Amino acid sequence: MLVLALSMTQTVFAAQDPAAKRAEFDAAVERLHGGDTTVDVTRLRFLSTELSGYDPYAEGDNHKDMNAAMGRSDFKEALRLARVDLDADYLDIDAQIVAMIASDKSGDAKSFGHHRWVVKSIYDSITGSGDGKTADTAYRVVTVREEYAVLALLGLRRTKQALVHDGPRSFDVLTTVHPETKSESTIYFNIDPIIAHQTKLFSKEKPAGGVIGGVPGGVSSPNADGSPR
């Protein structure tokens, strides 16, 4: 049923012209920003992949400075920077998480409650798509940062990563460890929208000898130390 629903959603997207997609997306983001709990966050996330400017590997312009501010406990500055990035992309889960934590540390209960709700809405949208234990029940993500945010929210650390193709489907398969219990687990993320985006770019650019597994964020084998690529 989930596959059928996603297929029907993609058909609806294809039937819309670019202006209609943008209008729907912007209206839904405005509602999300305003705290409308009826927003279909799953539809919103996947609609974002149909818009011009979609970049599954992008980070917010203030990503590094925002995290640096968090590192030195300058929570007001971190919150300011997070809000700037959210003005550009309200589905930036990294900025939402920082805004949530920084609001709490700054004593802004209203802001904390709102950003916590948005983070939970995105997290529930991802984890509601499967259990992440197999290819058939993989978490469906639309950006790389969603993968790492889910790991962070689950309290897991990535040790290995591999790109796996299964027919028309593609997966990031992450081996993880729980820092306290030291238990290992394997988590599957379906990255079809990400691969489709890269395939489209490659078809336009036509690089010599290019392979999807060689693009930033897609790996064919893990780093030995588990460090980000």
Image (spheres, rainbow, N blue to C red):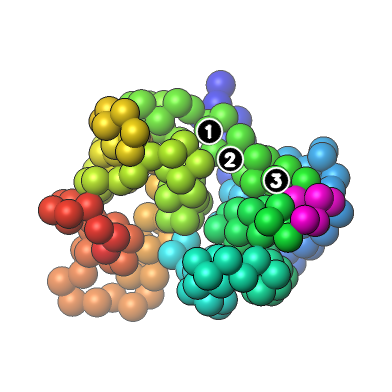
- Residue depicted at x 53% and y 70%: 72
Between circles 2 and 3, the one closer to the viewer is: 3
Q: Earlier in the sequence, mark 1 or mark 3?
A: 3
Whether tag 2 and tag 3 are in contact, CB under 8 A, the answer is no
Whether tag 1 and tag 3 are in contact, CB under 8 A, the answer is no
Disc 2 marks a residue whose amino acid type is Tyr
The CA distance from mark 2 to mark 1 is 6 Å
Tell me if residue 123 is in the magenta stretch.
Answer: no
Q: Which residue is mark 1?
A: 127
Disc 3 marks a residue whose amino acid type is Arg
Q: Earlier in the sequence, mark 2 or mark 3?
A: 3
Task: In the rendered structure, find residue 209 and report the number of the disc placed on it.
Answer: none
- Residue depicted at x 71% and y 52%: 104
Q: Which residue is mark 3?
A: 116
Secondary structure beneath label 3: helix
Using residue 161 as the reference point, say whether residue 68 is left or right of it: right
**Residue numbers of the magenta segment:** 107-112
Secondary structure beneath label 1: helix
Between circles 1 and 3, the one closer to the viewer is: 3
Disc 1 marks a residue whose amino acid type is Thr
Using residue 83 as the reference point, say whether residue 137 is left or right of it: left
Nearest the viewer among 77 and 86 is: 77
Whether tag 2 and tag 1 are in contact, CB under 8 A, the answer is yes
Q: Which residue is mark 2?
A: 123
Secondary structure beneath label 2: helix
